Image (cartoon, rainbow, N blue to C red):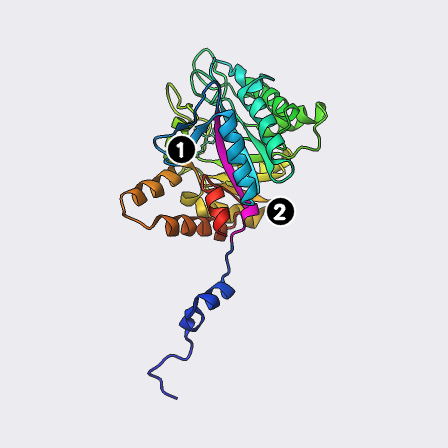
C-alpha cells in the first residue's frame, strides 16, 4: 500500500450531477416556502419598490394574480402586509373591518382556496403615522401594555376576515398571550399563532420600510427589537416565553446573519421553526447581481440552502414563487 496517495476520497461522491443529487443532505421543497406580499390601499397600478427590484406594492387585483401564481407553483403559504391610505397615532387601520388587510384577505382566500395557507402579519407600524410598532406614551416611548390591546384587536379583526395563521411581529412583551386570549374569547381557539419570537433590530429591514412605508419617524426600534449583540440566551428566552404563552410555531428574523440562532432554536424546541429572509438580504443579492458581481440564481439557492441547513423548517422569502418553480 502506498502511503503517498489517499484512500479516502470524498471527491468520489461529487463526480457526477446525479451522484451529488442523490447524496444531497439539504433539500428545499415549495411547501416550506412562504411568500411575503405588500398590498396598498387606493392604488390602481402596482407600484415597484425601488430598493427591492422585482417586488411591488400590489393593488387588490395584482395581489390576486400573485397569490394565484404562488399557489400554482406549490408555495406553502403567503403572508400579507397592508399599507393603508390613511395612518394615525393608534394605527386605526389595523383593526378596521374594511381595512386594506381585511379586504385583501377576502380576495386571496377566494383566489387560492385550500391550495395555500393565507397568513397575516400582526403589527401596527404600517398603520401608525409615527411608524412605531406600538402606541406611544406622552413621552414618546412605545407603551407595551396599551399596544397589547391594539394587537389583540387587530388579530381578532384579521381572524374574522379569514386569516389562517396570525403572525405577531411587534416584539412587545406578552403579545402572544394577549393575542391567544383574544382569539380564544372570540371563537378562534383553532387558529394557530406563528410568533416572530426572535427578531433583531436589524439594518437589513431597510428596503421593507420603503415597501411597507413604515420607517419610524423618530428614533428607532432598539427598545423593543433585540440587540444583535444582546445577552447570550436571550433568543431562547424569547422563544420559551412565546411557547408558554401559546405560540404554535416560532420565527427567527433576519435569517442569514443569524444562522447560529436558527440552529439553537431548532435544537431546543419541538414546534416548527421559521426563518425570514428579509428585504435587505433580498436587496443585497439583487443589487450585486444587477451589477454582474455575483451569479444571481446560484446566490439565491445557496442562501436558501444555508437557511434550511441551519434548521429552518419554513422559510419566508420574496423569491418564494420563483424558487418553487425551479424545485
Ligand atoms: C414589522 C415588520 C418588519 C418586517 C416584517 N415585519 C419591519 C420592521 O421591524 O421594521 C421586516 C421584513 C423585511 O425586512 O423583509 N411589522
In magenta segment, residue 217: no
Q: In which quarter of the image is ligand 1?
A: top left
Mark 1 vs mark 2, CA separation in Å = 28 Å
User: Is-magenta flag for residue 34?
Assistant: yes
Residue closer to the observer: 263 or 41: 41
Residue occupying image coordinates x 45% and y 18%: 141
Q: In this view, does 32 lie above or below 45?
A: below
Disc 1 crowd, CA 10 A, few/some/many (<14, 14-19, 20+): some
Mark number, residue 205 = 1
Quadrant of the rendering where the N terminus is positioned: bottom left
Q: Where is residue 92 in the image (x, y as percent from the top left)?
A: 53, 15
Image position of 263 with respect to 281: above or below: below
Part of the protein shown in magenta? 28-39
| Total tally of numbered discs in the picture | 2
**Front-most of residues 309 and 293:** 293
Which residue matches tag 2? 270
Sequence order check, earlier mark of 1 and 2: 1
Considering only vertical position in the picture, is 324 above or below 196?
below
Which SS class for mark 1?
helix
Expressed as whole percent of the image width and height from the top left, the position of residue 280 reads 38, 37
Label 2, secondary structure: give it: loop
- Spot occupied by residue 74 in the image (x, y as percentages of width and height): 56, 45
Query: Residue 269 has which mark?
Result: none
Query: What residue is drawn where x is 53% and y is 21%?
Result: 100
Whether the residue carrying mark 2 lies under 8 Å from ligand 1 is answered with: no
Amino acid at each position: 500500500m502506498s502511503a503517498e496517495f489517499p484512500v479516502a476520497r470524498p471527491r468520489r461522491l461529487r463526480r457526477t450531477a446525479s451522484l451529488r443529487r442523490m447524496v444531497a443532505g439539504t433539500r428545499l421543497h415549495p411547501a416550506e416556502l412562504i411568500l411575503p406580499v405588500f398590498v396598498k390601499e387606493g392604488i390602481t397600478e402596482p407600484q415597484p419598490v425601488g430598493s427591492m427590484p422585482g417586488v411591488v406594492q400590489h393593488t387588490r387585483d395584482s395581489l390576486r394574480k400573485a397569490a394565484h401564481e404562488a399557489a400554482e407553483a406549490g408555495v406553502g403559504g403567503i403572508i400579507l402586509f397592508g399599507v393603508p391610505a390613511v395612518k394615525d397615532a393608534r394605527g386605526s387601520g389595523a383593526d378596521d373591518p374594511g381595512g386594506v388587510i381585511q379586504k385583501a384577505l377576502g380576495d386571496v382566500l377566494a383566489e387560492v382556496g385550500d391550495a395555500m395557507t393565507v397568513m397575516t402579519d400582526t403589527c401596527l407600524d404600517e398603520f401608525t403615522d409615527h411608524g412605531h410598532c406600538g402606541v406611544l406614551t406622552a413621552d414618546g416611548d412605545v407603551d407595551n401594555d396599551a399596544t397589547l390591546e391594539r394587537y389583540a384587536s387587530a388579530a381578532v379583526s384579521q381572524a374574522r376576515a379569514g386569516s389562517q395563521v396570525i403572525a405577531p411581529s411587534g416584539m412587545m412583551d406578552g403579545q402572544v398571550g394577549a393575542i391567544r386570549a383574544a382569539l380564544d374569547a372570540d371563537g378562534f381557539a383553532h387558529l394557530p399563532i406563528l410568533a416572530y419570537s426572535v427578531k433583531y433590530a436589524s439594518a437589513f429591514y431597510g428596503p421593507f420600510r420603503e415597501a411597507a412605508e413604515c420607517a419610524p419617524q423618530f428614533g428607532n426600534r432598539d427598545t423593543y427589537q433585540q440587540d444583535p449583540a444582546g445577552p447570550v440566551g436571550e433568543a431562547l428566552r424569547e422563544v420559551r416565553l412565546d411557547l408558554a404563552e401559546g405560540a404554535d410555531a416560532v420565527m427567527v428574523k433576519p435569517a442569514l446573519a443569524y444562522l447560529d440562532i436558527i440552529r439553537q432554536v431548532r435544537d431546543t424546541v419541538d414546534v416548527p421553526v421559521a426563518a425570514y429572509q428579509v428585504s435587505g438580504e433580498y436587496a443585497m443579492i439583487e443589487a450585486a447581481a444587477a451589477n454582474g458581481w455575483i451569479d444571481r440564481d446560484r446566490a439565491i439557492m445557496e442562501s436558501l440552502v444555508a437557511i434550511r441547513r441551519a434548521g429552518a423548517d419554513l422559510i419566508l422569502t420574496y423569491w418564494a414563487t420563483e424558487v418553487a418553480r425551479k424545485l
